[in-house]
Amino acid sequence: MIGGWNGYSWLPKGGRETSPVSWSKKSVRLIGVLADGWFCIAIIDATNSETLKNFLDTIRADIGKAAMIMDNASYHKSEETDKYLNDSDGMFECIFLPAYTPQLNPIEVLWRDLKRALAGSYESIDDLKKAITDIVNSGELQPPKLFGYMLPDGIPPSKPVPCTIQDLTTPESKTEAAA
């Protein structure tokens, strides 16, 4: 079982309950972009420069010129990502957060809400992916409003897009997840 832990349970006073648990180290990786009032999430195979570039390629026509708030993940600061962003004709402006300050990144609110909505156990990776897709498509997640002062020159996306989710995993990883 693929499980989540929300940290709470109810037990009779003085009692200690146990339950059988099956653990799996399999996981689902997500990447996302959040703008004022909309967001896009993609299910990905790996968190690396190539995946980031592929994701930005899939959304760049929809968002136009945008400022991106990024943490200090190695793939955000890699030479490959830096070259891609420099070759993007000014489409993306990067704002790097100070180290260890996820609370400054507005998308962290979205990730927190998604994790809370997913609290529970799933029999398979496919079940978990379906739950993520269902939550995103339901409109249950509401992106926080961003403040113009956080973006240089108040750069908004030129064309808003609706909440979307994409599966950018490769056919090979989909086969592995089913196994």
Image (cartoon, rainbow, N blue to C red):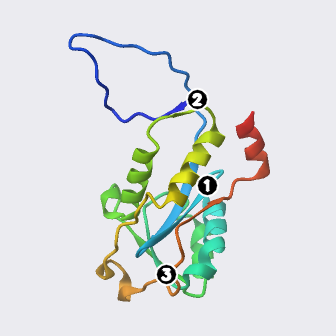
Q: Is residue 54 above or below residue 167?
A: below
Decide if residue 24 is on the left or right side of residue 100: right
Mark 1 lies on a secondary structure that is: strand
Q: Please state if 101 lies on the left or on the right of 134 as rendered.
A: left
57 left or right of 95? right
- Amino acid type at circle 2 is Ser
Q: Secondary structure at mark 3?
A: strand
Q: Residues within 10 Å of mark 3 (few under 14, many from 20)?
A: many
Frontmost residue, 45 versus 19:
19
In the displayed structure image, the side of residue 93 where residue 150 appears, left or right:
left
Q: Closer to the N terminus: mark 2 or mark 1?
A: 2
Q: Quadrant of the N terminus?
A: top right
- Real-space Cα separation, disc 1 to disc 3, in angstroms: 21 Å
Residue 174's place in the image compared with 163, above or below, is above
Mark seen at residue 66: 3
Return the mark for residue 43.
1
Circle 3: residue type = Ala
Tag 1: amino acid: Ile
The residue located at (44%, 57%) in the rendering is 140
The tag earlier along the polypeptide, 1 or 3, is: 1
Residue at horizontal 59%, vertical 80%?
62
Residue 51 in picture, x, y percent from top left: 64, 60
Q: Residues within 10 Å of mark 1 (few under 14, many from 20)?
A: some
Marks 2/1: CA distance? 18 Å
In the rendered image, the residue lying farthest to the left is 13
Asked whether 24 or 161 is in front, the reply is 161
Q: Is residue 33 visible?
A: yes
Identify the residue under disc 2. Answer: 24
Residue 70: x, y in percent?
44, 66
Query: Quadrant of the rendered structure where residue 100 is?
Result: bottom left
Q: Are marks 1 and 3 in contact (CB under 8 Å)?
A: no
Residue at (38, 58) in percent of width and height? 108
